[in-house]
Amino acid sequence: MAEKQEADIIKSQSEAYILDKANRMGLQIAVEVELDGHNGNIPCGVVIKGNISPYGQMQLESYIEQTLGIAKENQTWK
């Protein structure tokens, strides 16, 4: 039960970090972070939904990769 709560906290905090950065960039998006439950609930992927310019996407991709360690190839843009 504690692991599930920890996973929920990590997931929600990771999503909040991304949304905060996007909001500061003027982007309106929705995000869903995926966790690797086998490696201690580490963020391993993210799905981002929204209408974003290529420049905005590039900026946010880099931020997500640098701050959360989610590689660009594990970021799905819709």
Image: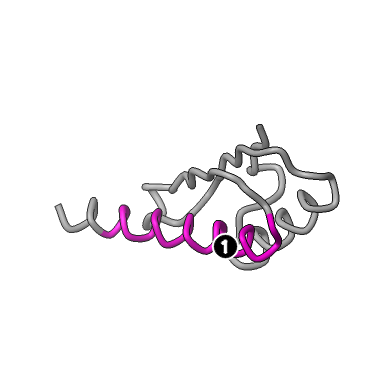
Of 22 and 44, the residue lying toward us: 22
Residue at 64% in and 58% down = 22
Q: Is residue 11 left or right of residue 75?
A: left
- Chief secondary structure of the magenta span? helix
Mark 1 falls on what kind of element?
A: helix
How many badges with numbers are in the image? Answer: 1
Q: Which residue is mark 1?
A: 68
Of 44 and 56, the residue lying toward us: 56
Q: Position of residue 57 (x, y in %)?
A: 76, 49
| 9 part of magenta stretch | yes
In the image, farthest residue toward the left = 1
Report the span colored magenta: 6-26
Residue at 84% in and 45% down = 54
Residue at 66% in and 32% down = 78
Q: Amino acid at mark 1?
A: Leu
Q: Is residue 42 left or right of residue 2?
A: right
| 61 part of magenta stretch | no
